[in-house]
Amino acid sequence: MPAIRVCQVTQLNLTHPDRGQARSYSPGVPWNFASRRPLPANAMMRGIHRSGSPRAPMDYRKPSDRKSMHSRIVQDIGMQIVSGRFKPDDKLPAEALLCEEYAVSRPVLREATRVLVAKGLVYSRPRVGTVVKPRREWHILDPDVLHWLMQSSPQNEFFALLTSVRSIIEPAAAALAAQHATNDEIAAIGEAYQRMEAAPTVEAVLQPDLDFHSRIADATHNDLLAHLCNMLSLALREALKHSNKRPNLHELALPRHKAILTAIENRDALGAHHATLVQLDDARNALNVVLGKGLKL
């Protein structure tokens, strides 16, 4: 698409090159030389005169109206892949069939396919088509892929997977926080715990609980570990929503979080590691109570 040039024109008589029609335009009217038409009055404010402006990043879970169909295709095909409807090495239906099914043009479908490629779910080759990649190659910590995984897996299976990963990452994070946290970072962890303690309802415990774990991750001063913890925050939120529903939440969960905080305050890395394992074991038990099914780790 050619760049749009805009300038302010004075009183002109312009003749259409094909129709020979002369038209008069007043001073101050923005003029599009590509189409030989005046631009709307608010074009300058909307930035139409700037070519090459970067587009805002797309949120595929909250699509704009213009991108809603493209977003639905990403959501629908992505969910079918993650849920096992399409298996590794399966070819997706031909482009023409998908365009007909979703009632979209080829450019819209191809843009959706590029998103799925970027998430590691498929690869696309000329004369081959679009093929589902092995599960180990999926970008499983991508927020959309993780969301689809949570939606398509039985709850006990997904939370068992999450608890297993947490038991590897979080004790190490607590130990590092005990070694490297600044006094201000320890105070921030303590502030999150105090909000957990003061929360009047089960729902009110959720955000302070998330903040407690997030601030421990930040206090490790290990950017990669903190990033991994942050990528798991969506799944952790869902797990806490369930585990926090058990009876006697405050009496059972708070002392275990307090033990982690105390160990970090005392710069006791081994104690923080052990206290976190105890807390995670309690979290698994809480999920068992709420879901009524054993989490096999």
Image (cartoon, rainbow, N blue to C red):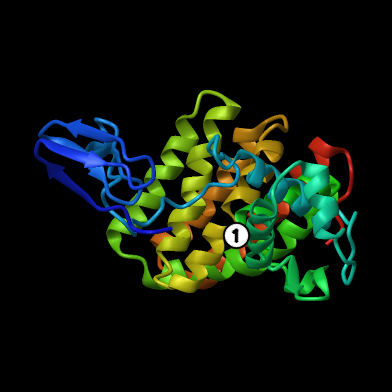
Residue drawn at (60%, 60%) of the image: 276
Residue drawn at (90%, 54%) of the image: 85
Residue drawn at (50%, 38%) of the image: 207
The x and y percentages for residue 174 are 51, 65
> Relative to residue 197, is residue 202 drawn left or right?
right
Quadrant housing residue 88? bottom right
Q: Is residue 220 above or below residue 64?
A: below
The x and y percentages for residue 150 are 75, 48
> Relative to residue 2, is residue 287 drawn left or right?
right
Q: Which residue is mark 1?
A: 276
The secondary structure type at the circle numbered 1 is helix
> Relative to residue 262, is residue 241 drawn left or right?
right
Quadrant in the picture for the N terminus: bottom left
The x and y percentages for residue 53 are 33, 56
23 vs 19, nearest the viewer: 19
76 vs 185, nearest the viewer: 76
Quadrant housing residue 26? top left
For the residue carrying disc 1, how many other residues have a C-alpha within 10 Å: few (<14), some (14-19), or many (20+)? many
Residue drawn at (70%, 40%) of the image: 243
Quadrant housing residue 54? bottom left
Quadrant in the picture for the C terminus: bottom right
Q: Is residue 256 above or below residue 134?
A: above
The amino acid on which the numbered mark 1 sits, given as a three-letter code, is Thr
The x and y percentages for residue 265 are 39, 60
Q: Is residue 142 visible?
A: yes
**Of all residues shown, which one is farthest toward the front?**
20
**Of all residues shown, which one is farthest toward the top?**
200
